Amino acid sequence: MYGDKLKRVLHLENEFLKVLIYENGSVDVLDKSSNVEWTHWPDGEPTGIIQLRAPDRGIPFICYLSATSNIRLFKENEFKAKIVFEGLKCVGGVLLGGSMEISVSLVESSVNFTLEKIELPKGFFLEKIYYPFRNFYLEKSDEGYIVWPYAQGVIFPTKMNSIKGKLCEVGLIHPDFAENDIFFTVELPVYSCWHFSMPWFGAVKKNSAYIAIIDTPDDAYAFISVLDPRNKERLIISPIWIPSHGELRYPRSITYTFISGGDYVTMAKVFRKYAMEKGYYRSLREKIALNPNVERIIGAPLIKLWIMDRYPWTGAASRTFGGERIPFLKVRTTYKQVQEILKDMHESLGIDRALILLVGWGPMGYDNLHPDVWPPGRWAGEISELRKARDLAEKQGYLFGLHDNYQDIYLESPSIGVGEAIVKTKEVAGVGHPLQLGGVWEGGQAFIVCSKCGLKFAKRNIPQIMSDLSPTCYFVDTTTAAPLYECYDAEHPTTRSEDKKYKIELLKYLNDCNLVTGSESGVYWAAKYLHYAEGIMRLESGGWFGKFGGIPVPLFNLVYHDSIVAYWHQGQPLNSNRKLMKVKFLLDLLYGNPTSWNFFGIEGYKEWRDQLKEVFNVASSLHREIAMDEMVNHKFLTDDYLVQESEFSSGIKVIVNFGEKEFVTPEGDKVEPMGFIIKKLSK
C-alpha cells in the first residue's frame, strides 16, 4: 500500500475490511475477500481541501488539510476513529486557525466518513469542503470502471478511449467523441437531479467494487475526473460538502460499501435496499392500490401533443424558431384535431393504451404565463372541445392530462406581483438578495418560484382544473429536474432540504387528487409519489443533456423499474431523430419501458403514425408483462459493449444487438444486427 511513504498511525479491522489511517489524515482500505487495495491519491497531493472566503477579499482561501498545524488521530472504540485537523493554513503557509473533525467508522463491509463539525477561522465563511478527497481512484492501467447515476446511468471503463468508436457510430456515445478522446474534470451538484438521479457513485477494480452512498446529499457536490491528463489520467469521483444557508449546520456523511466480485448491478441493488429502508421507494403495485388509474400506464406510450407556441419578445428579429422570425404565435394542434388524433390512434392503429399529455394549452401557449394558466387558451378552440377530447380519451382507455409548471414564473404572469414568490439568493453587499433566474424560454426570462409558494399556486389551480376538465394524469415540468434551491426571502426562507420537502408535497398533492403523476428527469427522493419520469431516458447531446461520453447502463431501472415508468425526455422522443429512432426503441426494450413521442400538429402525427403502430405492438406487449417486475440484471455480452442483455424477475430476458454482425447466444439464439430477441421463461 501507499502507506510505506507515510506513518501508519491507526487501523480498524474486521473479517471483511482493513482500514488504514495515516498521519496526514488519509485513508486506505483493503478488501480482504478479494485482496484488492483501494488507496488515497498519491504523489503528495492534499488529503482534503477547505475553501474559505473573507467578506473583503475577492479570491477564495484554499487550505490543504494535510498542511494543517496539527493532525490528531485517536480511536473511540475498536471500529471507530477520529481525525482532527487543527490550525488551518492557506496556500502559501499563512496560519488562519480553525479546525475540522472527521469520524471514520467500520461496520461489516462498509466504511463511513462523517464530517462531525468545523470551527472556522474568525472573519471567514465556508465555501466548500473536499473530504475524503479523490479517495479510491482508478489508474488508467487498472482493469475496471467508475459508475455514475447520470440520468439512467453511465460507466467509464479505464480503456474507454480504445473501445468508444463503434459506440459513437451507433449513437450510444455522442458522435463528437469519435475523433476526440474522452477526458474531463468537473464539479457537479449531487442535489441537481439533472446530474444525479440517485446520490451515489462507485468503482470496480479487478474483482472488487465499492458503492459510495452520500447519506447527506442535499448540500453536496461531486468531484468527477475521467482520464484527464491534468489529473494523471486517473478516474475518480469524490464528495464535496457545501454550506446550508452559509453554515455547515449538520454533520455530513458518506458510506463506502465494498463488494467482492461486485459490479454496477450489485451497486444498484445495494442502493435499492437503502432506498427501501429510507422510504425512497414504493412499488407500482402499491401505487395502483392507492389509485387504480395508475394501472392504465402499463403498456402506455407517452404521447405529447403540442397545442400552441408563442414568443412575445420584441427586438429579437434576428432569432428564429423553426425557421420563423420571432415574436410569433402559432397554433400547432387544435382541440378538435386532438380528438381526430385520439380517434385514429384507437380505431386505425389499434392502440388501446396511451398516456396523452397536452403541451402549450395555457392562455398564451407553451412556457408562458405560469403559474397563471387557467382557463386554457382559446386560440386552439373552446374549452368544450377540450373536454370532448378528454372524454374521448377516457372512453378509449387513455390517460389524459396536462403539461404544467410550478417552478417558473414570467414578467407577464399576474402572480409575479413585485416578486414576492420568487427565490431570493444570498445577499450581495449593496444589492440585497438578487432574484433567482431560471431559463430563457418561450415566455422570455423565467424566474424561479420558491417551492413553498409553488405548492400554494398548485393548490389554487388544480381544484379548478379538476372541476372543469377532470384530467386523469398530470405532468409538472422541472420539479424533479432542476437543482434544489436555497431561498433567503424573509417570508419564506428555505434550505435545500426544505425545498425538496415542498417539492415532494407538490407531487403528493397531485397523488391525493388521484392524478397519475409525472415530472421531468426523475429522481430518487420523489420515487414514492412519481408514477412516471420523462427524461430519465436520454442520450447525451449538447446543451441541456450534457456531453461526457459515458457508456449508458440502466442504473435507475435496476433500482426503480417496478416503481416508476421511465420515458424519454420531450427533447429526445423516438420521433425526434430518424437515425437514432431504432437505438432508442431498442434501449426501451432492453430497459423494459414503453415508448415516447412528440407530435407538433396533426401533420406531424400522420408522418409518424405507422412507426407508432409498429413500435407500440412490441414495446407495449413487453411492458404489460414486466411492468411489475424488478429488473434483476443487465450485462454486456461482447467486449465491444454492443450486445447487451437485461433480465427481469419474472424470468423474461431481452437481448439487443447494437452491432453490425449477427450475434449467436450460447443457446443458439440468433440476434440480427440492430435487432433484439425476447426470451420468456418456459412454463
Image (cartoon, rainbow, N blue to C red):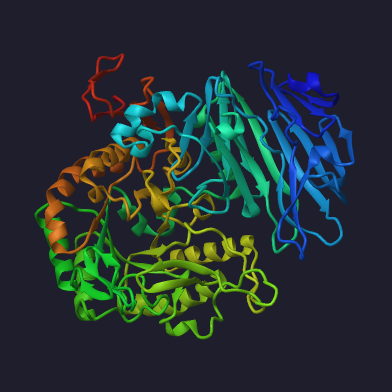
> In the image, what residue occupies the spot 64% across and 68% down?
494
Q: Nearer the viewer, residue 548 or 553?
A: 548
Q: Is residue 79 left or right of residue 627?
A: right
Q: Is residue 34 left or right of residue 174?
A: right
Give residue 633's position: percent from left, percent from top.
43, 30
Residue 312 in sight from this viewpoint: yes
> In the image, what residue occupies the spot 19% across and 79% down?
381
Give residue 527's position: percent from left, percent from top.
49, 52
Q: Nearer the viewer, residue 352 or 420?
A: 420
> In the image, what residue occupies the spot 54% across and 78% down?
421
Q: Nearer the viewer, residue 450 or 653?
A: 450
Q: Is 637 rendered above or below residue 301?
A: above
Q: Quadrant of residue 312 in the image?
A: bottom left
Residue 174 in sight from this viewpoint: no
Give residue 405's position: percent from left, percent from top.
42, 69
Q: Is 564 rendered above or below residue 641?
A: below
Q: How many marks?
A: 0
Q: Quadrant of the C terminus?
A: top left
> In the image, what residue occupies the spot 23% across and 30% down?
674
Q: Nearer the viewer, residue 608 or 646?
A: 608
Q: Quadrant of residue 385 in the image?
A: bottom left
Give residue 678's position: percent from left, percent from top.
27, 30
Q: Quadrant of the N terminus?
A: top right
